[in-house]
Amino acid sequence: MAKRKVIEDERKGEAESAESSSEESSSEDDADMLDVEFEWFDPQPQHDFHGLKTLLRQLFDVDAQLFDLSALTELILAQPLLGSTVKVEGNETDPYAFLTVLNLHEHREWPVIQQLTNYIQTQANRVPAIAQLGTLLNTSDNTRVGLVLTEKLINIPSEVVPPMYNMLLEEISWAIEEKEPYEFTHYLIFSKTYQEVVSALDEEDAPKQKKQKKAGNKGNAETFYFHPEDEVLHKYAAAFGSFEYQNEARESDSKRAFQELGMKPEGHLILIEAARFEEAVKSLQEYFNQG
């Protein structure tokens, strides 16, 4: 399938110089600059299955095994004119990022959508800030919720995200004109956050009094965002909140990543009423342009 639209975005990224000289000069002076050309494509059923499934597994983290990711990937690829992927070496390569929206009501008979809906309702019921999702996702109500799924590889800049949201708005508008089922009342964005936690190894060596003091501060832990755009979307949200994964994460040392503290990842949900979604998308573009 031909690509819908290609937007070239030259990003500057540092790459280490491969000089073999024995001189101990500053690495900053020797750094090279690498131009990367990002391209936005429609989802490609013949090329994107494995790449999208990998990104979905990353998005759902330790709870990914609770869902039929193969079926979810197939559902995303079954609507190739809605949503986008980001690639750097052409149409036939694996996506480095993606964004799509799924109609939870229209696809309610799909087992994987039932899995996702039940999962979101269960998690929302445990978090007062997003408890209203339990009722909103009840298919007997006159609501149409679009589940937005988006993820990118860690080293891909967040600036690739706003164009995908802009294209999604255009595609939804075209779909509605064609009487397709994408006239939503709400958008629900599935995301992820993390908190910094004390390494389990450090806690074993720490004095008992110190461990108790750190444990007492866990309730005040700062939330960090894997998706920086989430903080912008919060300003337009009817509700948002994080929740602990159903499967216990082995987070503290396996995700320590060369820093003193470990990471505890959590799921995150952002609910935006359809009337505010376009405004929220516009703010994303303005935010990253300023950055």
Image (tube, rainbow, N blue to C red):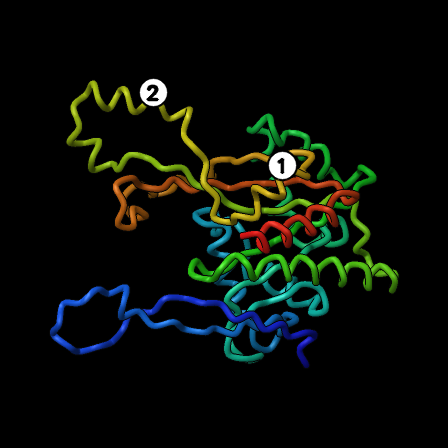
Q: Distance of mark 2 from mark 1, alpha carbons? A: 29 Å
Splitting the image into 4 quarters, where does residue 5 fall?
Answer: bottom right
Bin the neighbour count of mark 2 within 10 Å (Cα to Cα): few under 14, some 14-19, many 20 and up.
few
Looking at the image, residue 108 sits to the left or right of residue 141; the answer is: left
Residue flagged by tag 2: what amino acid is it? Gly
Position of residue 98 measured from the top left corner of the image (x, y, whole percent): 58, 62
Q: Nearer the viewer, mark 2 or mark 1?
A: 2
Q: Is residue 159 left or right of residue 203?
A: right
Choose between 233 and 77: the one closer to the eye: 233
x, y percent for residue 77: 64, 67
Circle 1 Cα neighbour tier, 10 Å, few/some/many (<14 / 14–19 / ≥20): some
Q: Nearer the viewer, residue 248 or 15?
A: 15
Looking at the rendering, in which quadrant would you find the N terminus?
bottom right
Q: Residue at x 60, y 29 (%)?
A: 125
Residue 228: percent from the left, percent from the top? 52, 48
Total marks shown come to 2
Which SS class for mark 1?
A: helix
Determine whether, in the image, residue 290 is placed left or right of residue 206: right
- In the drawing, what numbered circle is on residue 121? 1
Amino acid type for the residue under numbered disc 1? Gln
The earlier-in-sequence mark between 2 and 1 is 1
Report the residue at 71% width, 39% height from top: 137
The quarter of the displayed image where residue 82 is located: bottom right
Q: Which mark is residue 209?
A: none
Q: What element does badge 2 sit on?
A: helix
Quickly name the residue at label 2. 216
Q: Position of residue 256 (x, y in %)?
A: 29, 46
